[in-house]
Image (cartoon, grey):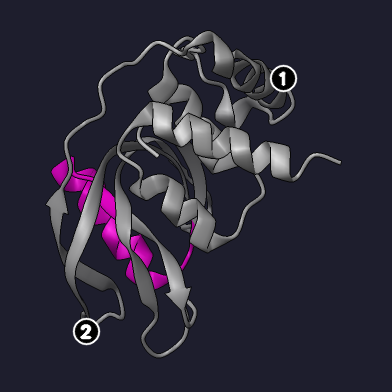
């Protein structure tokens, strides 16, 4: 989700080429959840909503492996995709409007508290120095990333364009799965 961090270890040639190109050109790349198939299969199908991400930190080990940390920038909707010669999925996308900061109403403060406790336990790669536990966009985005849910449900959450509606859906999800 926009504002979220995703650490990646890049070792496949197609992704090494993509990362080199992104670093050289100062661009990002898109990430979509796989709907059917697999990343290494013939032609995976992806869910239509994805996130443009940028590389915010990187290192390279002695074997040439890229260790990158990415951050979500903006949601998009996929219009079409194809697999290029190197096996990398490319696509035409429609960039969606950025969600505007929205203060969390009192009825959702328990979600911000839950997120705060969860982030204390995930380690330095997800050390959000610019955390905003008062913003429904930021809180709902991190919960979508961290909560254990199916790819289908995660995609449904990504597709919601109102952060308060997303918080309501997340609260319902949590209450349905309370033990």
- At label 2, counting other C-alpha atoms closer than 10 Å, the crowd grade (few under 14, some 14-19, many 20 or more) is few
Seen from the viewer's position, the closer of residues 150 and 28 is: 150
Query: Magenta region, mostly helix, strand or loop?
Result: helix
Q: Residue 137 at what x, y percent from top left? A: 39, 25
Q: Residue 74 at what x, y percent from top left? A: 25, 39
Residue 117 - label: 1
Seen from the viewer's position, the closer of residues 152 and 124 is: 152
Q: Under tag 1, what secondary structure? A: helix
| 171 left or right, relative to 80 | right
Q: Residue 113 in magenta?
A: no
| 72 left or right, relative to 115 | left
Q: Residue 17 in magenta?
A: yes
Residue occupying image coordinates x 18% and y 43%: 96
Residue occupying image coordinates x 59% and y 13%: 109
Instruction: Give the farthest residue toward the bottom.
Output: 42
Q: Residue 10 at what x, y percent from top left? A: 46, 58
Where 86 falls versus 105 (above or below)?
A: below
Disc nearer the start of the sequence (2/1)? 2
Residue ID for mark 2: 85
Question: Mark 2 to mark 1: distance in Å?
Answer: 45 Å
């Amino acid at each position: 989700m926009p504002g979220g961090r995703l650490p990646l270890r890049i070792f496949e040639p197609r992704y090494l080429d993509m990362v080199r190109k992104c670093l050289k050109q100062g661009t990002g790349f898109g990430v979509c959840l796989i709907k059917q198939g697999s990343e290494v299969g013939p032609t995976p199908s992806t869910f239509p909503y994805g996130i443009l991400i940028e590389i915010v930190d990187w290192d390279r080990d002695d074997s040439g492996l890229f260790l990158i940390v990415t951050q979500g920038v903006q949601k998009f909707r996929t219009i079409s995709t194809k697999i290029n010669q190197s096996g990398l999925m490319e696509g035409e996308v429609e960039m969606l409007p950025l969600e505007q900061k929205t203060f969390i109403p009192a009825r959702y403060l328990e979600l911000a508290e839950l997120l705060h406790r969860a982030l204390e336990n995930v380690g330095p790669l997800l050390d959000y120095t610019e955390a905003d536990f008062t913003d429904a966009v930021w809180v709902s985005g991190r919960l979508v990333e961290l909560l254990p849910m199916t790819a289908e449900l995660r995609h449904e959450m990504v597709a919601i364009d109102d952060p308060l509606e997303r918080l309501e859906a997340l609260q319902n999800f949590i209450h349905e799965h309370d033990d």
